[in-house]
Image (cartoon, coloured by chain):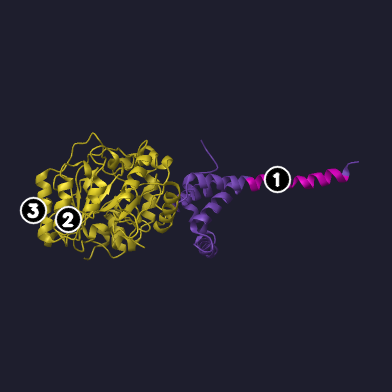
Chain colours: A yellow, B purple
Amino acid sequence: MEVSEAYRDARDPFERSLSESNLFPLLSEGISVFQMNMGRVCNLSCRHCHVGAGPGRTESMPPRIVDECLRVIERQGYPTLDITGGAPEMNGNYRRLIESAVSLGVSVKTRTNLTILVEDGYRDLPAFFAFNRVEVVASLPYFSSETTDRQRGAGVFNASIEALRALNSVGYGVEGSGLKLFLVYNPCGAFLPPSQRAIEADFRRELKKKFGVSFTGLFTITNMPVGRFLDFLNLSGNFVSYMERLKSSYNPEAAANVMCRNTISVAWDGSLYDCDFNQMLGLKCASGVPDHIRDFDHERLSVRRIVTGLHCYGCTAGAGSSCTGAVVK
Amino acid sequence: METYYNPEDLQKFSTISEGAPLLWKKFSEWYGAVFAEGALTEREKALIALAVAHAVQCPYCIDAYTQACLEKGSNKEQMTEAVHVAAAIKGGAALVHGVQMKNAADKVGM
């Protein structure tokens, strides 16, 4: 697409960055990851949460939307289901969703804040995950309580270690078991994550030495200027400098590999988005393509234009950021 | 209130090239090579830079290398120890010159 100089100058800065790296307009390259956000209910209220999730929220995916999603997954044969939230475990349809997806031959991964796994009513989930060969992606911002609790709340680190030990006990993160346990690091503040390889080595060493915990791998995720993290940026006076840091770290290679190009994100109410961040910003899929699961059209969605904004500098900074960590290895 | 240092000036560092662009270019290339991974990791170099920043008391460098250390995966415990290293060298350097003081006092004393 040719763009006039006048339009280029008037455009959103991120579109300009894409254009300068020959990526504008950013298009989907097909759908291989079907991501479902089961709602904003959570047992925690983390300070960096882009969802703004917490115990006081009520948004929760109803059974009919879960059923619609399963019908789409089966019809299209999507290989991967990625479950997120809030705390997706707290949705009453969570276990049924996993069992149904597994029965369709879908590879299921679930995101977890870990602490929910040691609460009454959820302690059997590690065994449930293992039985269904679910890939577990667990948030753990650091290997110390001081940093983790500052971001996620008092007692979170200790509860996380207890949960990790429970997961290890059923085989997760244990070599040879085939049960994958990934940890997610995100910075406890307004700075970019370190090299994924370097911080993974730190986590592996410290968690093993101090707590006897093992895991499969680690993902680094950049904090996005959305939700509570945006609130933190504004309240702490870090917004401008953080956005400048993200923008000046724009990496065309990361932009070419952003996760929205192979993912579709379904919200708790069935609305469709390019990613979880667009979901929280209310930026539905581009006009002209279906925006609700009931109208799902794989052919149109798999070639759609991705809706972008300034927040997209978060996923394209440095080594890039995605639900599976750095995109530039 | 007027101050000698403005944090915003750190972002204008490259404007120093206006007086001598070729020298700036050489400096930039060398600077980038210094901080690249080598026998020392990027994190180790950032911690050294942080310590030196405190030793020479450059507020721009302290700001920049605090950020850099965090982005290389360091933490406040490591960074505080690095500051202590700087303090120990600065303090030690002062103290060891006290030997010169003793020598000078002994020379003129009876």
Q: Main secondary structure of the magenta part?
A: helix
- Position of B13 with respect to A10 (left or right) is right
Q: Position of residue A14 (x, y in %)?
A: 30, 55
Q: Which residue is mark 3?
A: A295
Q: Is residue B57 above or below residue A54?
A: below
Query: Of the residues tagged 2 and 1, which is closer to the observer?
Result: 2
- How many badges with numbers are in the image? 3
User: Magenta segment, which residues?
Assistant: B88-107
Q: Is residue B89 magenta?
A: yes
Q: Within 10 angstroms of label 2, few (less than 14), some, or many (20 or more) residues?
A: some
Please identify the residue farthest to the right as the structure is shown.
Answer: B110
Label 3 secondary element: helix
- Position of B25 with respect to A110 (left or right) is right
Q: Which residue is mark 2?
A: A102
Residue type, numbered disc 2: Val
Numbered disc 2: what chain?
A
Q: Is residue A151 visible?
A: no
Q: Position of residue A156 (x, y in %)?
A: 35, 39
Q: Residue at x 9, y 51 (%)?
A: A68
Q: Position of residue A309 (x, y in %)?
A: 26, 52
Q: CA distance from mark 3 to mark 1?
A: 76 Å
Query: Of the residues tagged 2 and 3, which is closer to the observer?
Result: 2
Q: Is residue A268 above or below residue A11?
A: above
Label 1 secondary element: helix
The numbered dot on residue B94 is: 1
Numbered disc 3: what chain?
A
Numbered disc 1: what chain?
B
Q: CA distance from mark 2 to mark 3?
A: 24 Å
Q: CA distance from mark 2 to mark 1?
A: 69 Å
Looking at the rendering, in which quadrant would you find the N terminus of chain A? bottom left
